[in-house]
């Protein structure tokens, strides 16, 4: 393939016809934190503070999607399990960033202690709930000192500036490695966290669904360290929630975040993203993707795939949406797939890819690359290796590779089997349309 690219009038970096992987508010882990088994139920966030392991703290960030006025924050709770060794030193705690001047930026932080009042030490082992911390009058649970209030008080003693402010950030943090009560003297404190509840929006760390007929509806925002499979003939309805790909403990994420499990699948109304993935290049089945249909007909509609990347990586993977079917030439029987109304932003390699024996209707999508960049040649939409497609009314931008070795394309056609395209809007791409075999201007559905 490299020799073929060198024979072209100019070189463009495309996604190859490689293998496919078998099968609430946004949140992210930071510091020494990982998704592990042993949740309540399922998986949990393991948050650790170990004086001998950098950075010595960890946590979960769960900022509201839009600011929440302090009086409108009615529910805040979480399940926790202190596995090593106890509570102490103000850890674990929930910290809420409060904006008091309506500029969207926090002016300070309200700390809310987790554990038994008033000492917040001696946490029992095993899963327990914080209970609703809003309105909580336990002695000393609230620290309003960054707003001129007391360091050791109750919810009702919030300063006026807080009462008139809005919550813009939220974290659960564990950082008690310095405290003997928290660590038992071994300089390590470990806490499992699950079921974070913010005004009825519950964050879990594994993805659960309510199934009715052939529709599986996502119960809430969640994280996954492995592919979520959509059974044959089923619809995955995200109900507006977010699935976040994270690395498994001791490894890295492999394959697609969401993938068909049979010959037909439908995915709708879900956001797919990634958080702090290791920059490890994979090939074939293990390539990283957002939503992947491999050998399946169906539709991908009204989804958002955002930040589907391994950082500023040059690995040739990280397609936001990909549909593919063997054989990867013009001899196969095409499977019909509709890709419409989606938003793909800040992907690693391609926004939307149709490869092989597929007949793709790619309509009304907004595809935005990260360019100009110097680490990978992105393509907004790719139709290649025998695929046929109807491509119209899409907005494609930001695919721009600054080195001259390869070219980034808004729309890349490579050895396709007929592509009809019209009313697409392109801007800020290195080259808007790159044609290396359109296969004619007719959609062969």
Image: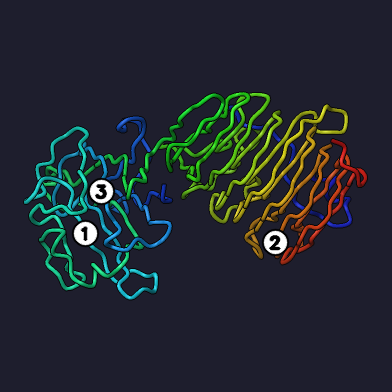
| Quadrant into which the C terminus falls | top right
**Observer-nearest residue: 85 or 365?**
365
Q: Position of residue 226 (x, y in %)?
A: 49, 34
Residue 109 seen in the current view? yes
Can you identify the residue that label 1 sits on?
A: 111
Q: Circle 3 sits in a helix, a strand or a loop, which is it? A: strand
Numbered marks: total: 3
Q: CA distance from mark 1 to mark 2?
A: 42 Å
CB under 8 Å between discs 1 and 2: no
On the rendered structure, is 8 left or right of 103? Answer: right
Checking the image for residue 49, the label placed there is 3
Pointer 1 local density, CA inside 10 Å: few below 14, some 14–19, many at least 20: many
Residue at 81 percent across and 38 percent down: it is 387
What's the residue at 25%, 47% (across, down)? 50
- First in sequence, mark 3 or 2: give its number: 3
Q: Residue furthest right?
A: 440
Colour setup of the view: rainbow
Identify residue for label 2.
397
- Measuring from the top left, give residue 420's x and y in whole percent: 86, 48
Q: Nearer the viewer, residue 135 or 387?
A: 135
Comes first in the chain, label 1 or label 2: 1
Tell me residue 201's x, y (percent): 37, 46
Tags 3 and 2 in contact by the CB under 8 Å rule? no
Q: Earlier in the sequence, mark 3 or mark 1?
A: 3
Image quadrant where one finds the N terminus: top right
Mark 3 and mark 1 residues within 8 Å of each other at the beta carbon: no
Which of discs 3 and 2 lies nearer the camera? The answer is 2
Query: Dot 1: what SS?
Result: strand
Q: Position of residue 337 (x, y in %)?
A: 73, 36
Report how far apart the C-alphas of labels 3 and 2 lie in the structure.
42 Å
């Amino acid at each position: 393939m490299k020799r073929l690219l060198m024979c072209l009038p100019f070189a463009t970096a495309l996604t190859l016809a490689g293998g496919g992987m078998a099968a609430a508010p946004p949140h992210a882990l930071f510091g020494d934190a990982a998704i592990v088994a042993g949740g309540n139920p399922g998986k949990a966030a393991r948050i650790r503070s170990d004086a001998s392991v950098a950075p010595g703290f960890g946590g979960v960030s769960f900022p509201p999607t839009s600011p929440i006025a302090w009086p409108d924050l009615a529910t805040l709770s979480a399940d926790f399990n202190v596995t090593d060794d106890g509570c102490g030193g103000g850890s674990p705690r929930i910290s809420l960033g409060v904006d008091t001047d309506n500029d969207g930026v926090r002016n300070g932080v309200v700390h809310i202690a987790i554990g038994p009042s008033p000492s917040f030490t001696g946490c029992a082992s095993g899963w327990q709930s914080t209970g609703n911390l809003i309105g909580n009058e336990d002695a000393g649970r609230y620290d309003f000192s960054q707003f001129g209030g007391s360091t050791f008080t109750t919810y009702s003693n919030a300063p006026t500036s807080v009462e008139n402010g809005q919550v813009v950030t939220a974290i659960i943090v564990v950082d008690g490695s310095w405290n003997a009560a928290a660590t038992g003297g071994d300089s390590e404190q470990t806490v499992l966290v699950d079921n974070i509840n913010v005004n009825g929006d519950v964050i879990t760390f594994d993805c659960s669904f309510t199934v009715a007929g052939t529709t599986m509806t996502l119960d809430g925002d969640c994280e996954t360290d492995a592919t979520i499979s959509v059974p044959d003939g089923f619809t995955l309805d995200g109900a507006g929630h977010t699935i976040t790909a994270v690395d498994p403990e001791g490894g890295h994420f492999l394959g697609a975040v969401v993938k068909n499990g049979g010959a037909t699948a439908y995915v709708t109304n879900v956001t797919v993203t990634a958080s702090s993935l290791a920059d490890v290049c994979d090939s074939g089945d293990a390539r990283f993707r957002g939503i992947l249909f491999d050998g399946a007909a169906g539709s991908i509609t009204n989804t958002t795939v955002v930040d589907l990347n391994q950082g500023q990586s040059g690995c040739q993977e990280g397609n936001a949406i990909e549909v593919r079917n063997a054989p990867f030439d013009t001899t196969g029987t095409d499977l019909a797939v509709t890709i419409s109304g989606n938003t793909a932003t800040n992907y690693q390699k391609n926004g939307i890819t149709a490869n092989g024996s597929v007949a793709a209707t790619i309509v009304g999508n907004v595809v935005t690359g990260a360019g100009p960049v110097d680490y990978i040649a992105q393509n907004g939409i790719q139709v290649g290796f025998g695929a046929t497609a109807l491509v119209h009314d899409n907005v494609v931008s930001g695919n721009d590779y600054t080195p001259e070795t390869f070219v980034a394309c808004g729309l890349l056609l490579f050895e396709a089997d007929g592509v009809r395209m019209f009313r697409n809007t392109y801007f800020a791409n290195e080259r808007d349309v790159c044609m290396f075999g359109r296969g004619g201007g007719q959609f062969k559905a």
